[in-house]
Image: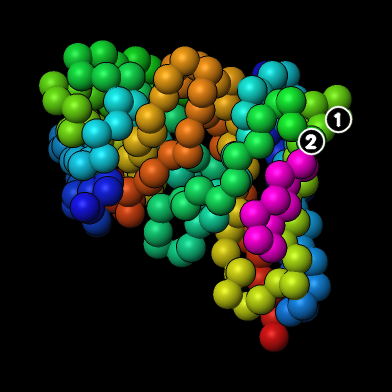
Amino acid sequence: SQKIEQNSEALNIQEGKTATLTCNYTNYSPAYLQWYRQDPGRGPVFLLLIRENEKEKRKERLKVTFDTTLKQSLFHITASQPADSATYLCALDRGYNNDMRFGAGTRLTVKP
Amino acid sequence: NAGVTQTPKFQVLKTGQSMTLQCAQDMNHEYMSWYRQDPGMGLRLIHYSVGAGITDQGEVPNGYNVSRSTTEDFPLRLLSAAPSQTSVYFCATTTRGGRVNTEAFFGQGTRLTVV
């Protein structure tokens, strides 16, 4: 069966360090992979999208990699700040009609 | 420009009751979907619509109905509420065209408790 696993339920890091979150998938061939941020009591908010033929994407302090051989995406936040504390979700999409599937999320806490 | 609006924000139902969760968008997006979010399970797709008059089932459709009579609205109906439907429900919209995907915009969610 299809599985999307985000490496840990929670990740605690010190302010200024780089946070690295992992998204692994099995029995799936996504055309796109997206990362979302979700704050408590709010809906997810889009951060980055990476296509299957792209290895890396950057946006300000965010970087996403996508390895279709390893079936894995890494999401990095550099120079992390307490304001980056939130739950981060990865989502895989085969790119037609529908079928965007989400991981359970990783709750990131950045301590001052 | 409100984006995606869900009502109500909170709801408590008794087992067996029915209700409709409302979702409205002013972004003129073709694609709308409903997800439920449960602890440790991520967002699971319930139903989706690729345009007015067209709906289809997602991963967990049982116990829910949808309709799409306009581009703007996509209500989710619980036919006979069960405690297993206690969850947070999110409506999302996106523009889709062939294999060109775009980001999804989510509403604020409806927290539903079935007792």
Residue A67 in the figure: left or right of residue B38: right
From where the camera sits, is residue A52 visible? yes
Name which quarter of the figure residue B28 lies in: top left
Q: Which mark is residue B73?
A: none
| Above or below for B9 versus A4 | below
- How far apart are the two marked residues, 2 and 1, measured between alpha carbons? 12 Å
Disc 1 marks which amino acid? Leu
Given residues B37 and A98, the one toward you in this image is A98
Predominant SS along the magenta part: strand
Q: Name the spot of residue B59 as percent of width and height, x first.
A: 47, 23
Q: Residue tagged by mark 1?
A: A70
**Residue A31: x %, y % from top left:** 64, 23
Q: Earlier in the sequence, mark 2 or mark 1?
A: 2
How was this image coloured?
Answer: rainbow
Within-10-Å neighbours for mark 2: few <14, some 14–19, many 20+? few
Q: Residues within 10 Å of mark 1 (few under 14, many from 20)?
A: few
Label 1 secondary element: loop
Q: Is residue A81 above or below residue A35?
A: below
Q: Is residue A37 left or right of residue B6?
A: right
Above or below, B31 against B38 in this view is above
Looking at the picture, how far across and down is residue B48, in whole percent? 35, 24
Residue that mark 2 sits on:
A55
At horizontal 22% and vertical 53% (from top left) the residue drawn is B2
Indicate the amino acid at tag 2. Answer: Lys
Q: Is B107 placed left or right of A106 in the picture?
A: left
Mark closer to the observer (2, 1): 2
- Subunit ID for the residue under disc 2: A
> Residue at (85%, 25%) from the top-left corner?
A69
In the picture as drawn, the residue positioned furthest to the bottom comes out as A112
Q: Which residues are magenta?
A: A56-65
